[in-house]
Image (spheres, rainbow, N blue to C red):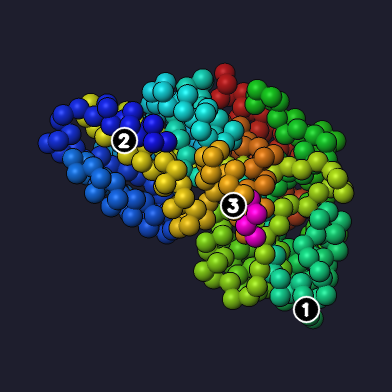
């Protein structure tokens, strides 16, 4: 990334000496906001000709703000976005391609997952960090129940979950697993269980839904049976948008599946011994699968002339290896650099290690409309859990609905 910084330095016109102001937007997430504020302070100290204005918005309103502002010429020059939004944003004209040199550097320096930042053969963003999923577990509850360590297979997972679920007077007071269809569990079903059971969620070109087959049905049935049959979890057990995570932090949920981005929140909140493990397998020696994702920084069409060059310089700074190391410490997300991920200190780390190891086989879902496609899978799960629908019927409805989304986009 030093080469990239040098490359961008050469591009800076003399006009920057007179001062250029650029704007950076992201959604409100405390650790990320604090991290960017500190990075802006460091960047401006190194680049006295550039001022960066940092603005944040609530997550639920963020995409609407972008959609309203950029066409009106009043939005950001550099914007943070979830990789799954990129196809829709590109189609709407909210992003512009990065220079060809950036694509070559992405191919060379970043983990394979970052390829999802490309749309139509052009690069529209670069991540600072990447994410994968892992199993968080309450070591104290495990020890009290005489459980030696985290489950290695889903069969063990169910047995552990049942042992750690407590029901008094017909009411659950502690649950083994924090069911969260709209948390990370929709990824768990689509990208992990479908693959572990021998299927593929989509065609290689991402244009056809494939999870409606035998593997997909087995995955949805298996997951929903954690509630319907095994009773190791209950929807809405703990209140709040992130109730599964909050319940874990409160010591009322023994296990959750969450992303590496949750490390910081759990470290700050949990008052017990906890650990992290790679996701269980369908059987000993079975196929490993994981979901990978990332937020990336892209340029908007508002960044022109000297502002574009200043924005590229800022983009190089916030995706540098130095920044990635800081981001890991501050936010808890994994470096996107191949070089940093290879560091054995990271892969052997008791907390970060399971996430890092998972990056080798994690898949980033080829979303074209992340919000709509997420809703399809969440609805498929909830129809079974909350309405009692047969998993085969619910899965068939989901596949039909998502295929329409894909067809509409690619048409």
Crowdedness near tag 2: few (<14), some (14–19) or many (≥20) residues, C-alpha within 10 Å: many
From where the camera sits, is residue 14 visible?
yes
Q: Residue furthest bottom?
A: 169
User: Which corner quadrant of the image does residue 392 belong to?
Assistant: top right
Say what secondary structure mark 2 lies in. helix
Cα distance in 3D space between marks 2 and 3? 28 Å
Residue 303 lies in quadrant: top left
Quadrant of the image containing the N terminus = top left
253 lies above or below 211: below
CB of mark 2 within 8 Å of CB of mark 3?
Answer: no
Q: Upstream in the sequence, badge 2 or badge 3?
A: 2
Q: Using the image as rendered, state which of residue 352 and residue 410 is in the foreground.
A: 352
Q: Residue at x 53, y 44 (%)?
A: 340
- Element under disc 1: helix
Distance, label 1 to label 2, CA atoms, is: 53 Å
| Mark 1 burial class by Cα count in 10 Å: few <14, some 14-19, many 20+ | few
Q: Where's residue 117, x and y in %?
A: 51, 31
x then y, percent, for residue 305:
23, 26
What residue range appears in magenta?
346-350
Residue at the location (46% across, 28% down)?
A: 105
Spot occupied by residue 36 in the image (x, y as percentages of width and height): 36, 51
Asked if residue 71 shows in the view, the reply is: no
* Disc 3: CA contacts within 10 A as few (<14), some (14-19) or many (>=20): some
* Magenta-colored stretch includes residue 347: yes
In this view, 323 is above or below 309: below
Kindly identify which residue carries mark 1.
144
Q: Is residue 105 left or right of residue 233?
A: left
Identify the residue at horizontal 62%, vertical 57% (top origin): 349
Residue 77 location in percent, x, y? Answer: 30, 36
Q: Are marks 1 and 2 in contact (CB under 8 Å)?
A: no
Residue beneath disc 2: 313
């Amino acid at each position: 990334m030093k080469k990239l910084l040098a490359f961008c330095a050469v591009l800076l016109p003399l006009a920057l000496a007179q001062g250029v102001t650029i704007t950076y937007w992201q959604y409100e997430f405390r650790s990320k906001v604090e991290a960017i504020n500190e990075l802006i302070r460091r960047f401006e100290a190194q680049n006295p000709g550039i001022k960066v204005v940092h603005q944040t918005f609530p997550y639920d309103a963020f995409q609407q703000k972008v959609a309203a502002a950029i066409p009106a010429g009043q939005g950001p020059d550099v914007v943070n976005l979830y990789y799954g939004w990129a196809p829709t944003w590109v189609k709407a004209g909210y992003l512009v391609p990065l220079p060809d040199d950036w694509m070559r550097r992405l191919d060379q320096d970043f983990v394979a997952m970052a390829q999802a930042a490309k749309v139509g053969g052009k690069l529209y963003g670069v991540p600072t960090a990447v994410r994968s999923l892992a199993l968080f577990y309450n070591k104290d509850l495990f020890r009290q129940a005489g459980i030696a360590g985290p489950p290695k297979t889903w069969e063990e997972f169910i047995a552990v979950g049942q042992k750690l679920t407590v029901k008094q007077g017909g009411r659950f007071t502690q649950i083994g697993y924090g069911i969260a269809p709209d948390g990370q569990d929709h990824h768990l079903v689509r990208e992990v269980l479908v693959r572990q059971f021998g299927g593929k969620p989509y065609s290689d070109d991402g244009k056809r839904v494939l999870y409606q087959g035998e593997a997909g049905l087995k995955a949805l049935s298996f997951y929903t049976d954690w509630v319907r049959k095994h009773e190791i979890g209950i929807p809405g057990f703990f209140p709040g948008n992130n109730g599964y995570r909050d319940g874990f932090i409160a010591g009322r949920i023994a296990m959750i599946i969450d992303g590496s981005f949750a490390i910081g929140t759990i470290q700050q909140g949990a008052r017990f011994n906890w650990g992290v493990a790679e996701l269980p397998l369908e059987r000993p020696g079975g196929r490993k699968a994981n979901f990978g994702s990332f937020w990336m920084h892209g340029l908007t069409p508002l960044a022109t002339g000297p502002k574009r060059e200043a924005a590229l310089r800022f983009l190089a700074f916030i995706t540098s290896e130095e920044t990635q190391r800081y981001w890991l410490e501050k936010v808890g997300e994994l470096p996107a650099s191949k070089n940093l991920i290879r560091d054995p200190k990271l892969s052997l780390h008791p907390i970060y290690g399971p996430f890092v190891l998972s990056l080798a086989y994690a898949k980033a879902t080829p979303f074209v409309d992340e919000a709509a496609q997420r809703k399809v899978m969440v609805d498929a799960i909830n129809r079974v859990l909350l309405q009692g629908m047969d998993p085969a019927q619910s899965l068939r409805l989901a596949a039909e609905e998502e295929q329409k989304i894909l067809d509409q986009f690619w048409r």
